[in-house]
Amino acid sequence: MSTSLRTPPPYLVTLSRFLCRTTLADVSPEAKARARWIIADCIPVIAAGMQQTQMKAYAARHLSAAAPGNAWVIGTGRRASPLDAALLNGTAGTWLELDEGNLFAKGHPGIQVVPAAVALAQERRASGADLLLAVALGYEASARISRASQVRLSVHPHGTYGVIGAAIAAARLIGFDEAQMLELLNVAATMGMATSRQTLLDGATVRNIFTGHSGFMGLTATRLVECGFTGEIDGVGNVYGRVLSDTFDRERVVAGLGSEWLIAQNYFKLHPTGRYVHSAIDALDDLLSRVPGGRLDIDRIKSIKVRAYMLAAMLAERRVVSSFGARFSVPFALASILYHGRSGLASFDDQAVANPKIQALAAIVDLSEDEQHTARFPSEQPCDLAITLDDGTRLEGHCIVTKGEPANPHGPEELEGKFFDLGVPVWGRETAQAIFDGLSKLEQIPDFAAFTDRFSI
């Protein structure tokens, strides 16, 4: 093979250099703040997800044969090797659909990067500052790779570019040099899954393993490179320009690198549903804000019409048969919130799915795409909702930018409230407070393992 064919593409050289040379001082204050919140948000989300029946069974079965280690298996009170912890924590983290995400990255980078980074930071006794930087870099690079491609709509984004993000975070904690980092990008790019978006529409819980796969395979990729394994010359471009997508803009991966931070453009979720459902929920909140008492008599509702952008309009299943499937149905979400008066976990549990009044209300929801709304996405996420009552009264609600986006952010008090709402039932108030206080000052922790050794969570 000629030497020219072994020359790495310039964009990967630039990216590798950035990933190895960037310090925490180089990260913008906004990006650092978001990275800190993302870590703090993921941990209780994982703990709550780990309490689900299937996750309890999976964790118990897996841990019976897992390698020993110092990494939290969050929500079990047990520890394991980083590989095993990343797999289980990543899987639990998407079960309740409360993990953060990024519309520009077209998915959920945080829950694919954080479990691997936290587990390895515990095992290697890294500082909190090093953990924060590793997460920021893994998130940023993988998000940029996803943004630069047009991954097929049939492909679920979990378990794909997240492998790269987890690998980068691990490599930064280990101390890879630029040559190793470049090799890692190409190795990790080929270790994603052939995921299916149909899992969402079918309510198939196998979808939750996709994020666990990202952490597990990201850590495996670093081990492979340490052992001398090699990747393609441009594995990133080949996978994201030929396999998962037919379009990949290599220059867009590195455009504005270090000055534009995609991690600072993420969103946080307060509703336990797929992100695109949130736009319809916000439109309903807008409608109910003008109703006395903020409640409607559901027996008086004759029709519900929703017009949304394409990705929201796809979530149109009316006959939901499982709690997991309920989280990806706009009709069910609207019906259950109207019935319960709120969008908490109880609005999407098995009892809610079995409720005939909720099912009957979901059956009359008319959801369709408005192409003009689709054209405004992702900068805006417009959704229009109209409810007609039995006396002909028509009530309307609208969403332009979904709550939690940078242009319409949740306040710190809301994110803190979410942390304790999810964490306290699992750990108790005192432990939850101590964990939150430490994560809020992550850069000040000299030994992350020493901090985490205080808690059995």
Image (cartoon, rainbow, N blue to C red):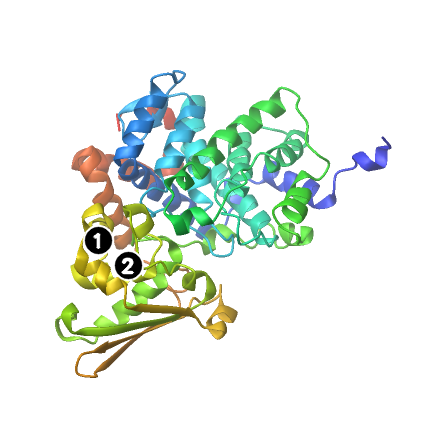
Q: Quadrant of the C terminus?
A: top left
Against 279, residue 344 (above or below) is above
> Which residue is more in the foreground, 290 or 273?
273
Give whichever of discs 2 and 1 has the lower sequence position: 2
Residue carrying label 1: 347
**Residue 254 visible in the current orientation:** yes
Secondary structure of the residue carrying tag 1 is helix
Q: Amino acid at mark 1?
A: Ser
Q: Is residue 455 left or right of residue 268?
A: left
Q: Are marks 2 and 1 in contact (CB under 8 Å)?
A: yes
> Which residue is more in the foreground, 194 or 238?
194
> Which residue is more in the foreground, 221 or 388?
388
Residue at the right extreme of this rendering: 2
Secondary structure of the residue carrying tag 2 is helix
Against 400, residue 125 (above or below) is above
Q: Position of residue 456 (x, y in %)?
A: 26, 25
Q: Quadrant of the N terminus?
A: top right
Structural crowding at the residue carrying mark 1, measured as other residues with C-alpha within 10 Å and reported as few (<14), some (14–19) or many (≥20): many
Q: Is residue 331 left or right of residue 176?
A: left
Structural crowding at the residue carrying mark 2, measured as other residues with C-alpha within 10 Å and reported as few (<14), some (14–19) or many (≥20): many
Q: Position of residue 15 (x, y in %)?
A: 64, 43
Residue carrying label 2: 333
Please give the count of numbered marks on the rendered protein: 2
Q: Position of residue 111 (x, y in %)?
A: 42, 41
Gap in Å between the C-alphas at discs 2 and 1? 8 Å
**Residue 132 visible in the current orientation:** no
Q: Amino acid at mark 2?
A: Ala
Q: Position of residue 434 (x, y in %)?
A: 24, 35
Q: Which mark is residue 181?
A: none
Q: Is residue 55 left or right of residue 66?
A: left
User: Within the image, what quadrant is residue 55 found in?
Assistant: top left
